[in-house]
Every structure is written in structure tokens, then in C-alpha cells.
Image (tube, rainbow, N blue to C red):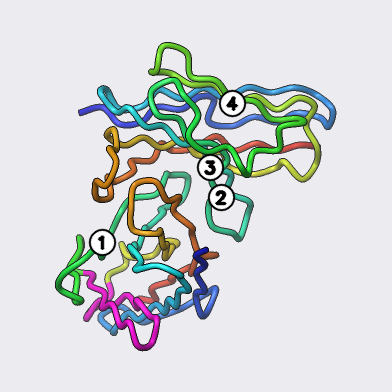
Amino acid sequence: EAGVAQSPRYKIIEKRQSVAFWCNPISGHATLYWYQQILGQGPKLLIQFQNNGVVDDSQLPKDRFSAERLKGVDSTLKIQPAKLEDSAVYLCASSQEWLAGSSYNEQFFGPGTRLTVL
Amino acid sequence: AQSVTQLGSHVSVSEGALVLLRCNYSSSVPPYLFWYVQYPNQGLQLLLKYTTGATLVKGINGFEAEFKKSETSFHLTKPSAHMSDAAEYFCAVSGGTSYDKVIFGPGTSLSVIP
């Protein structure tokens, strides 16, 4: 079974530029997550989708970050304009669809995109 | 709300020695608890999880963890370290349903000395 795919793996940009990351989840996984992992810290959830609807985006800096999941499969995360503090690894994860009252569904992580903002 | 602390950002052990990585959590509801491992330039992989039932949980690669409610702890252990265990380890907590986001600790970097 193919895992979660992300591209690009590395990106270097200057501050105030724009950047986009792409994620393709495991086939059949309805739930998709984007995390930000700053060096020396654990991952922080930015946004969670169930199919193509947003479940949680409470920690997404909406003035500069946006994400979409068209057709409930692939997803893109965009930063516009980037700041120095956005330098981090952006991880995408997916899990099977969760239902009300269901137990935890394991999240499967992609390799991440390492963003450096100069 | 949930939170996680991991004592020791870096831990070094000799090959063959006991591995002990510490995790304490805070949760206002019965928690789900997890340990993830991250190898360089890779995503996170689930080592083990506690949801309900038996408090001693066995995971992959010989790791296990014990949920101690009275101590609000979920420490990770392995009897004998291998060189391949060198990685970053993250403890995480969620609120016990799939509605709840997973909150990760800051991580512990494990080094294994030959």
C-alpha cells in the first residue's frame, strides 16, 4: 500500500514570497491533516479535513496560510507571504474516516516538506 | 485541554542498555496516549498507543509503555537498545475520541552509543 506522498521535499524561499505544498493521502483515507513542526518541537496541527470539509483550523494563521482539499483527495497548503518564523517541516497525515463516538484511527504521516525562509 | 511534557530533550544509552523515555500528560478527560518515532528526514511512525483496557501496552520494535493514571505518566521502555533505535521520540495525547486533536510533546532525541 502506498503511503502519504508530499512534494516538494525541500523548499527555500525569501521572506514575503509565496509557497505551496502538496499532499496525496493514502487511498481511501477520508481524513487529512497538516502539521507544522518547528525545529526542536513536536508537530502542531494546522488544519484537519474530513473529505473536503474543514473539521478544525483553529491553529491555522489565516492571514497568511490557506489550505484546500478539492474533491476530498489531494490537498495543498499555501503560505502567502512567508515570514522567517514559518521555517519548519510541514507534515501531512491521513487516517480512515472517523465517525461519531468511534475510537482512534491511526494517523499515517508523509515524509514532510522542509521549508527554509531567508 | 491536553498537554504533554517529556523529561530530557536528549537521552544517550549504550547499546544493549535499558531505554527509558519519560512522558507526563495533563488531560481533563480520560486520555488516549501515544508514542511516535521519527527517523531523520522521515515522517512520524506510531510505536504504540493506549486507548482503554490493559495499562501495559506493547508496540513495535520491542518497545512498551505503561499508563499510570495516578502518576499521569506514560513512560516508554525497551530492555535492550539497538543502534537502529537512534531517533526522535514523541509522546502525544488526545481527548479520547476521534473529534479530539492529537497534542504532541516536544520530543526526546535518543542516541545509542556502540
The x and y percentages for residue A53 are: 46, 24
Label 1 to label 2, Cα distance in Å? 20 Å
Indicate the amino acid at tag 4: Leu
Are the residues tagged 3 and 2 within 8 Å (C-beta)? yes
Count the numbered circles shown.
Answer: 4
Numbered circle sitting on residue B48: 1
Figure check: A49 above or below B94: above
Do pointers 4 and 3 mark residues of a single chain? yes
Q: Chain of mark 4?
A: A
Q: Residue lying farthest bottom?
A: B70
Q: Which residue is mark 4?
A: A77
Q: Which residue is mark 2?
A: A44
Tell me the crowding category of disc 4: few under 14, some 14 to 19, or many 20 or more residues within 10 angstroms, Cα based.
some
Q: Which residue is mark 3?
A: A35
Label 4 to label 2, Cα distance in Å? 15 Å
Asked whether the viewer can see residue B89, the reply is no
Do pointers 1 and 4 mark residues of a single chain? no
Q: Nearer the viewer, residue A33 or A8?
A: A33
Secondary element at tag 4: strand
Q: Nearer the viewer, residue A5 or B85?
A: A5
Label 3 to label 2, Cα distance in Å? 5 Å
Do pointers 3 and 1 mark residues of a single chain? no
Q: Is residue B106 magenta?
A: no
Secondary element at tag 3: strand
